[in-house]
Structures are given as C-alpha cells and as structure tokens.
C-alpha cells in the first residue's frame, strides 16, 4: 500500500467511499477562483494525492494526469471534459458505454 498524504477514504478523499474518480478531482477546485488553470499547477499541488476509482483501486492524481493532453483548462467544464478523456484513455474510468448503448433502465 502506498503512503498517501491523507487517508484515501477520509474527508479529503472519497469521504467514506461515497465519492470516486472525477468527483474527488473536482472537489479540489473552486470554479470561480481557480480558472484558467494549468495542468502543471494542478499536478504540482495535488499530484501525490489519492483518487479512489472503485472499492479496490486507488491511483494518484499524477497517474491520471499522465494521460491529460492539454496544458491549460479555461473553466470547470473544460477540466471535466479533458480529464474525463484522460481517465478513459488511461483505463481509469470504470464505465465505458459502447456507441448506441443507453444507461436508461426500462421498467
């Protein structure tokens, strides 16, 4: 087990396994104060912090950002889109629907 700077499941992490992946990254940001934001600045500040992906897997922020293909984010939406692509390309995203599939459940 890696020595993380804080408990991956504490208040700074998954909050008792209630938040995963992108939700953990996004809670590090203030959408009114932090943008524009460079990827390098985000990694410098948070790179060694844990990101819980599921009940078993934890990676660092730096691991996720190895797959980010953009140097600067204009706003929170840009951050979400870019980091979401990075998480999918790095196999950090747990659910990847195929084209034409729907997550809508019919009764």
Image (spheres, rainbow, N blue to C red):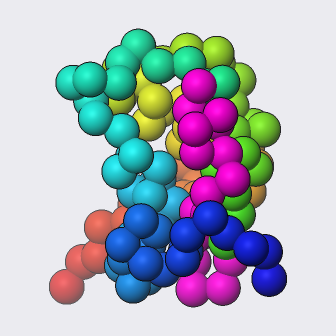
Residue ID at (70%, 63%): 59
Q: Image height check: is 33 above or below 18?
A: above
Res 68 seen here: yes
Instruction: Give how far across and how far down residue 18 sits, in percent.
Output: 36, 79
**Based on the displayed image, in which of its 4 quarters is residue 107 positioned?**
bottom left
- Please count the marks in the image: 0
Left or right of 87 in this view: 18 = left
Vertical comparison of 7 with 69: above or below: below
Query: What's drawn in magenta, residue-wise?
Result: 41-57
Q: Is residue 87 visible?
A: no
At horizontal 30% and vertical 67% (from top left) the residue drawn is 104
The residue located at (57%, 86%) in the rendering is 55
Pick the quarter of the image with the N terminus: bottom right
Does residue 70 appear to the left or right of 77 in the view shown? right
**Residue 90 on image: x %, y %:** 76, 49
Q: Is residue 17 above or below residue 97?
A: below
As drawn, is 30 to the left or to the right of 94? left
* Vertical order, 89 against 70 (above or below): below
- For residue 25, side relative to residue 51 (left or right): left
As for residue 53 lying within the magenta part, the answer is: yes
Residue 19 placement (x, y as % from top left): 39, 70
The one nearer the camera, 25 or 81, is 25
Q: Residue at x 46, y 68 (%)?
A: 13
- Picture quadrant where residue 39 is located: top right
Residue 52, image quadrant: bottom right
Q: Position of residue 46 (x, y in %)?
A: 58, 45
């Amino acid at each position: 087990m890696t020595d993380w700077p804080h408990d991956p499941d504490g208040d700074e992490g998954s909050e008792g396994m209630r938040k995963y992946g992108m939700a953990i990254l996004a809670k590090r940001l203030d959408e009114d104060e932090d943008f524009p934001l460079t990827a390098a600045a985000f990694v410098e500040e948070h790179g060694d912090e844990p990101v819980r992906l599921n009940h078993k897997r934890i990676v660092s922020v730096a691991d996720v950002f190895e797959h980010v293909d953009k140097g600067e984010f204009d706003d929170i939406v840009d951050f979400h889109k870019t980091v979401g692509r990075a998480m999918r390309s790095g196999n950090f995203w747990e659910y990847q629907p195929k084209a034409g599939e729907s997550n809508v459940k019919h009764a």
